[in-house]
Amino acid sequence: MPKAQIVLQIDHRKILLGKCGDARPFSMVISKDADVYNRLFLVRALQDLFQYSLMMKPSDTEVLLPENVLLPLDLKQLVSRVLLEILKVSSIMFVPDVLTTCIASGVRNAIVVDIAWEHLVVVPVFDLRILQKQMTVSVKGGKFLHKLAKEARQADLIYQVEEAGLWLKEDLAHLRRRIEKEVIGCESDDTFDIDESPITQMLREVYQNLPLDVRGTLKQRVIVTGWLSNSRGFRNQLKKALFPHFSLIDTMGPWVGGSLYLEHYAELEKFQTNQKLKRCKSVDQVVLDDWHLQSFRSYTRNCC
């Protein structure tokens, strides 16, 4: 009997889990006090999602995980161990989330701006291959946005910092100005440290380091994902800051891209040899390499 194909996305604020081909996944929002990468918390959260949302046995599933390009190996091994050794899923496959984001936009070439929790990363992608040498990283991710929000309110942390009212409420005008200056940036501002660059400076740096024959294609396809990416006010302000040098395009997100990729991968498997790696050793011995060496490979538990 064929295994059910599942897409699982884990980030700081929520877990998305759903069947390949579904219109939208089941979502579990993580409270601000919880650590999603705590082993016990992750096991219980995934067990609840499989049992009460999907209503499926984990052992009957193959799981694809869109992974952040800067996900530490110890966290990747933790997720692998939970899925393979505790939940007993049939197999897992890691794909960089910037690639699934491109797939969800219907393009193979783009510059992806990923506003993750720990960092802001700008990744050029050509023919669904990450151009690692041109990738740039800044500390101005979701955690930095929450710091700005806390300072602006002088109160408890604003967990949903990308709320729709951020660009509408008068009492948040100071917060908007700080985000526009410190996260979006402006053309003439060169006063930031190398690891604190705003989006506009990072895009210019990536563009200048790209080969000449791909610059024109990538500059017209900038995709923003992660924190604030669904805020219309933020996107409009970013468009103004980037125009006329770069153009933004929409995406349905890394989870939807993972679902589309999994359907395509399943079709390819019918004509190619099985590329899944049998896990006859421990997870620590199997998941040794980072995403740029292990892209599009699958880790399968030993089912003799």
Image: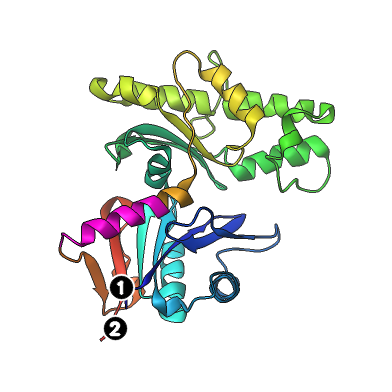
User: Residue 224 or 41: which is nearer the viewer?
Assistant: 224
Give the residue drawn at x 32%, y 33%.
109
Q: In which quarter of the image is residue 116?
A: top right
In contact (CB < 8 Å): disc 2 and disc 1: yes
Q: In this view, does 182 lie to the left or right of 110?
A: right
Give the residue drawn at x 59%, y 28%.
235
Q: In this view, does 287 lie above or below 191?
A: below
Residue 59 placed where, x, y %?
Answer: 41, 79
Q: What residue does disc 2 label?
A: 303
Q: In this view, does 63 lie above or below 233?
A: below
Is residue 286 shown to the viewer in this render? yes
| Membership of 18 in magenta stretch | no
User: Residue 80 or 205: which is nearer the viewer?
Assistant: 80
Q: What residue does disc 1 label?
A: 300
User: Residue 99 or 38: which is nearer the viewer?
Assistant: 99
Which type of secondary structure does the marked residue at label 1 adopt? Answer: strand
Q: In which quarter of the image is residue 150?
A: top right
Residue 20 placed where, x, y %?
Answer: 42, 59
Q: Mark 1 Cα within 10 Å, few/some/many (few <14, many 20+)? A: many
Q: Quadrant of residue 71?
A: bottom left
Give the residue drawn at x 32%, y 23%.
217
Q: In this view, does 184 lie above or below 23?
A: above
* Dominant secondary-structure state across the stretch colored magenta: helix
Give the residue drawn at x 50%, y 15%.
243
Is residue 295 shown to the viewer in this render? no
Q: Is residue 41 left or right of residue 261?
A: right
Residue 132 placed where, x, y %?
Answer: 32, 39
Q: Disc 2 and disc 1: Cα gap in Å?
A: 8 Å
- Disc 2 marks a residue whose amino acid type is Cys
Q: What stretch is highlighted in magenta?
A: 259-272
- Disc 1 marks a residue whose amino acid type is Thr
